[in-house]
Image (cartoon, coloured by chain):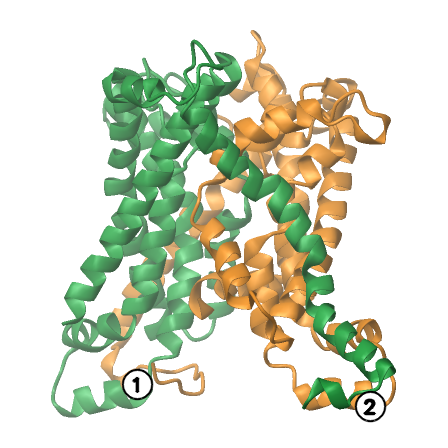
């Protein structure tokens, strides 16, 4: 349509049509620009200004300090430790539950799905506080049960390794059902004919799982892995409330260190460097997982 | 990936014997017990007087202090926090759903310059941890003096605004707006409806299920949120529920009965909404994962 053939009224109309999508986007763009994009950029800038002389221009001080900071290293190791234990545990359990629920239970499937999903709607702070009671060293229910079974009580929240394990437990409780629901939906989209064909070839349940279910669910498995990884690398509420990052920083996470640095020690520049280290680490882990998934496909 | 119609019986029955089926049921029931028990324990402890919560052996049945724990909480400013949380979550959910549907509509139903770059920008931010924004946002809120407030620290808008343009919501709305037939929109335009009318009276009404799912998701996100309100709500009168309860944990003498009652009262509304709108909840969770 040549615009020179249009009357002024038609041209005005065309202008308005062209402008329309931007008007619809305007509120989102304004808020996004001011409250997300600006802080993301400002934070990067802050991280390159020295904590001690903030107005001395570009400086790598914060990053230099970060490399030598044993507390940051501890937070990083703790967070990666959580990741390595908790992501496979939680996704493995979710897969087992989804497959079981999909294979045998026909009557109560909706009820089971509801029950398993319930922890996933609970506030993280609530999960942390409930587990704080359950895991109380002297008077918690879990130690009471262990005691009844003749097992020595475990110092769940006051000893390094048990405290890490307590976090894994609370997180697994919170997220397994969520991932199970995702897996269940994905399982149901696998064509039944595939299983029927495999059965004709004499494949058992185990063989079918590895030959059909896992390859068909690869995109979903990858996605849940990346999502849980990103989530765990950012973990804050659980270590902050369940273990209070203790004992002696043994359950300090990167996000709790960021909070402490920025809002308890008021070191805004150094905290921004910690934040960007988190961005980088998350990007590396996500990329790594996509790479591994791709290699598996060949 | 090939898709077939969902069926309830995917794996033919003969391959699961009666014994296997029994074992599977047993495992699933144990799992369900583990899933539910912490909730039960929370309610039991919420009904105990503080001195009885950490008792050995632990109580496994309800106590008689539920009402006095509630009274104690409300004497401690819980009512105000309840109002703050509810107000913030409702305003946030309504506004963010509205903004996401506007943006989703633009991305799904218009071709315009910069469309893919802008959409890509929203998606990219999904990958960046929101903790990165905390420091500059805090500094920003300390500087703004709009609307007569001395600063925006400890204000409702400081909690509501930052996550209002929710990339996940925009993504979700775009996905479902794409299924809207262009003919339907054009028919309304030919009938003389302006772009705004087309959006509000043709596009939006057909999106009700997605809007409901997103509203519930957004309400829950804000109601449960802890990190940012903990940072920005420094005035006791402005604390949301999680922040108020965290303050109770920090006291030198912790009243565990009240603490658990506070936790239970914060969890209960979400549980009730979940049971009433189970389908929307789960489709919200799946939209983020399966469709992506």
Q: Which residue in the protein does label 1 denote?
A: B12
Q: Quadrant of the N terminus of chain A?
A: bottom right
| Residue B54 x/y as whole percent | 49, 19
Residue at x-position 39% and y-position 60%: A180
- The answer to whether residue A19 is seen in the rendering is yes
Q: SS for tag 1?
A: loop
Q: Quadrant of the C terminus of chain A?
A: bottom left
Residue most extreme to the top: B252
Tell me the CA gap for discs 2 and 1. 53 Å
Q: Which image quadrant for residue B181?
A: bottom right
Q: Which image quadrant for residue A252?
A: top left
- The answer to whether residue A154 is seen in the rendering is no
Residue at x-position 50% and y-position 62%: B117
In the depicted structure, whether residue A120 falls above or below residue B112? above
Chain B: colour as depicted: orange
Structural crowding at the residue carrying mark 2, measured as other residues with C-alpha within 10 Å and reported as few (<14), some (14–19) or many (≥20)? few
């Amino acid at each position: 349509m040549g615009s020179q053939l249009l009357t002024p009224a038609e041209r005005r109309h065309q202008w308005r049509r062209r402008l329309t999508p931007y008007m619809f986007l305007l509120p989102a763009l304004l808020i996004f620009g001011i409250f997300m994009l600006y802080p993301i950029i400002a934070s990067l800038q802050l991280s390159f200004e020295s904590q001690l002389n903030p107005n001395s221009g570009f400086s790598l001080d914060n990053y230099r300090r970060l490399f030598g900071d044993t507390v940051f290293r501890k937070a990083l190791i703790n967070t990666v430790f959580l990741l390595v234990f908790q992501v496979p545990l939680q996704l493995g359990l979710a897969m087992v539950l989804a497959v079981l629920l999909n294979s045998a239970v026909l009557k109560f499937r909706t009820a089971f799905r509801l029950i398993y999903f319930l922890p996933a709607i609970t506030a993280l702070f609530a999960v942390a506080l409930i587990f704080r009671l359950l895991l109380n060293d002297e008077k918690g229910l879990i130690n009471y049960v262990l005691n009844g079974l003749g097992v020595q009580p475990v110092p769940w929240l006051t000893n390094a390794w048990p405290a890490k394990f307590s976090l894994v437990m609370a997180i697994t409780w919170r997220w397994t059902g969520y991932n199970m629901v995702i897996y269940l939906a994905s399982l149901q989209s696998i064509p039944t004919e595939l299983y029927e064909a495999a059965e004709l070839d004499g494949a058992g349940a185990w063989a079918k799982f590895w030959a059909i279910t896992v390859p068909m669910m690869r995109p979903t498995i990858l996605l849940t892995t990346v999502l849980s990884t990103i989530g765990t690398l950012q973990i804050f509420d659980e270590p902050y409330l369940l273990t209070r990052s203790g004992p002696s920083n043994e359950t300090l996470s990167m996000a709790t260190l960021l909070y402490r640095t920025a809002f308890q020690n008021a070191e805004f520049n150094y905290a921004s460097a910690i934040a960007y280290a988190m961005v980088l680490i998350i990007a590396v882990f996500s990329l790594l997982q996509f790479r591994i998934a791709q290699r598996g496909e060949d | 990936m090939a898709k077939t119609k969902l069926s309830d019986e995917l794996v033919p029955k003969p391959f699961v014997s009666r014994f296997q089926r029994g074992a599977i049921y047993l495992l699933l029931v144990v799992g369900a017990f583990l899933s539910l028990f912490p909730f039960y324990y929370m309610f039991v402890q919420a009904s105990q007087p503080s001195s009885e919560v950490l008792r050995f052996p632990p109580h496994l049945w309800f106590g008689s202090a539920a009402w006095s724990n509630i009274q104690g909480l409300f004497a401690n400013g819980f009512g105000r926090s309840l109002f703050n949380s509810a107000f913030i979550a409702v305003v946030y959910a309504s506004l963010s759903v509205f903004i996401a549907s506007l943006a989703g509509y633009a991305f799904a139903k218009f071709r315009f310059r910069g469309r893919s770059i802008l959409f890509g920008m929203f998606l990219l931010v999904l990958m960046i941890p929101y903790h990165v924004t905390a420091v500059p946002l805090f500094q920003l809120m300390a500087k703004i003096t709009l609307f007569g407030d001395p600063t925006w620290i400890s204000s409702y808008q400081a909690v509501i605004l930052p996550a209002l343009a929710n990339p996940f919501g925009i993504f979700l709305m775009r996905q479902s707006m794409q299924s809207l037939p262009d003919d339907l929109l054009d028919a309304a335009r030919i009938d003389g409806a302006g772009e705004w009318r087309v959006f509000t009276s043709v596009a939006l009404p057909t999106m009700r299920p997605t809007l409901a799912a997103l509203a519930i998701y957004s309400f829950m996100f804000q109601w449960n949120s802890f990190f940012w309100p903990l940072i920005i709500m420094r005035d006791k009168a402005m604390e949301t529920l999680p922040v108020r309860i965290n303050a109770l944990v920090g006291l030198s003498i912790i009243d565990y009965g009240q603490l658990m009652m506070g936790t239970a009262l914060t969890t209960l509304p979400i549980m009730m909404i979940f049971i009433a709108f189970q389908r929307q909840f789960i489709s919200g969770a799946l939209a983020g994962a399966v469709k992506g």
